[in-house]
Image: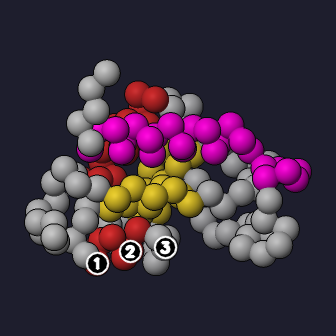
Amino acid sequence: MRPSSSDSPSRMSPTSHLLLPFSATDASRCRCSCRIGSPAAAALLTKLAGIYSPELVVGTTAACCSDHQSSNAFGFPSTQMFERNGGIIDPMYHNTGDVSRRAGYDLDQVKSISKVTLAGLLEVAEYVQ
């Protein structure tokens, strides 16, 4: 069944793309895609970041063409959470050295963005404790 074309995040496909490590000047941040995706989904995750990961500096990025693009193409409100607001600085990105047990890999950043993504999924699923 294809979802409605409305921008309501009642069904949503949030994805997180962790391009680690960071440069020494990077703050803990997260950026939602503003080129492809749903403004409502980005707004929801931005709100949830303020609640569950207030250490994140949240904004938007013009980065595109990642995992959320297919969900968006099929009518699911979607957004991608990127942790950088710029180009990929990781020379190991998407190759055999792309592992978490190396210098510069910030597991606190992974935890912060993961909390926001999980909170978004629970919110859309209307999970009540």
Examine the rendering and report whether any part of residue 33 can be seen: yes
Which residue lies at the image location 60% right of the left edge and 65% below the top edge? 86
Q: Mark 2 and 1 residues: CB-CB less than 8 Å, in contact?
A: yes
- The residue singled out by tag 2 in the image is 69
Instruction: Name the element at disc 3.
Output: loop
Residue 53 on image: x %, y %: 51, 32
Secondary structure of residue under mark 1: helix
66 sits to left or right of 74:
right
Residues at marks 3 and 1, CA–CA distance in whole angstroms: 12 Å
Residue 60 visible at all: no
Q: Residue furthest right?
A: 103
- Mark 2 and mark 3: Cα distance apart in space: 6 Å
Horizontal side, residue 30 vs residue 94: left or right: left
Among the 4 quarters of the image, the one containing residue 48 = top left
Three-letter code, disc 1: Ala
Asked whether 23 or 119 is in front, the reply is 119
Which amino acid type corresponds to the residue marked 3 in the rendered image? Answer: Ser
Q: Is residue 83 above or below residue 53?
A: below
Q: Position of residue 10 (x, y in %)?
A: 19, 50
Kind of residue at badge 2: Gln
Mark 1 lies on residue: 73
Residue 35: image quadrant is bottom left
Residue at figure coordinates x 37%, y 65% from the top left: 34
Q: Report the disc number at residue 66.
A: 3
User: What's the colour scheme?
Assistant: secondary structure
The chief SS type of the magenta part is: helix
Residue 80 image-quadrant placement = bottom left
